[in-house]
Image: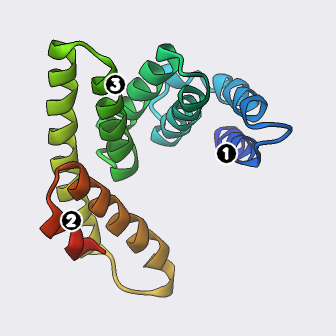
Amino acid sequence: NQTAFKQQLALVTYKSKEPDELSALKEAQAILGELNPMHSNNAETLGLWGAVHKRLFEIAKQRADLDTAILSYEKGYRLLADYYNGINWAFLLNVRASLSGPADAITDYVLARRTRSDVLEICKTKLESLKDSEQTRAERYWILATMAEACLGLEDTAQCEKCI
């Protein structure tokens, strides 16, 4: 499958940080661009597009990269209601809130809290459906890590401690 191949190629490219992190991110961006991510209904493509732009924002501090990452994670989350896109979307909403005026900051903050609450429920449901086995240990780890991050973002330290 060409889409899965390009997704994997983009992932290993940006994670390689070769020849340098910015160049690797730009190359991964070009690879994913061939999949037309903002017109895609593939949550994996959207999650990768969001990850690349999130890291581009961390390096270059360009607001357009932050906004693209937010849109990508939001679309991926709304397509599948998955915890990966959801928790990243919530985190970046808080980042954007810290850079915005009061009205926009409040909007992003409230949306981030609601998303974290929803992500907690998604994770709880997913965790209950998983059987404890070698095959599910990595997934269980990421679900619990996501739950802990969501609780931390909600400032619910008691619930957070239950996840770790």
List the single residue furthest toward the bottom: 133
Q: Is residue 119 left or right of residue 22?
A: left
Name which residue lies at 47% across and 21% down.
68
Name which residue lies at 21% across and 65% down.
125
Task: Specify the amino acid type for callout 2.
Answer: Thr
Viewport quadrant of the N terminus? top right
Q: Is residue 120 left or right of residue 50?
A: left
Spatial distance from mark 1 to mark 2, Cα to Cα? Answer: 28 Å
Position of residue 97 measured from the top left corner of the image (x, y, whole percent)? 27, 25
Task: Specify the amino acid type for callout 1.
Answer: Leu
Q: Secondary structure beneath disc 1?
A: helix
Residue hosting label 2: 125
Say which quarter of the image contains residue 52.
top right
Q: Is residue 10 left or right of residue 65?
A: right
Residue hosting label 1: 11
Position of residue 101 measured from the top left corner of the image (x, y, whole percent)? 23, 12
Say which quarter of the image contains residue 45.
top right
Say which quarter of the image contains residue 27.
top right
First of labels 3, 1 by sequence position: 1
First of labels 2, 3 by sequence position: 3
Mark 3–mark 1 CB contact (< 8 Å): no
Choose between 155 and 29: the one closer to the eye: 155
Name which residue lies at 55% across and 28% down.
53
The crowd level at tag 2 (other Cα within 10 Å; few <14, some 14-19, many 20+) is few
Spatial distance from mark 3 to mark 1, Cα to Cα? Answer: 25 Å
Task: Specify the amino acid type for callout 3.
Answer: Arg
**Above or below for 38 versus 139:** above
Name which residue lies at 17% across and 41% down.
113
Residue hosting label 3: 96
Q: Secondary structure beneath disc 3?
A: helix
Query: Nearer the observer, disc 2 or disc 3?
Result: 3
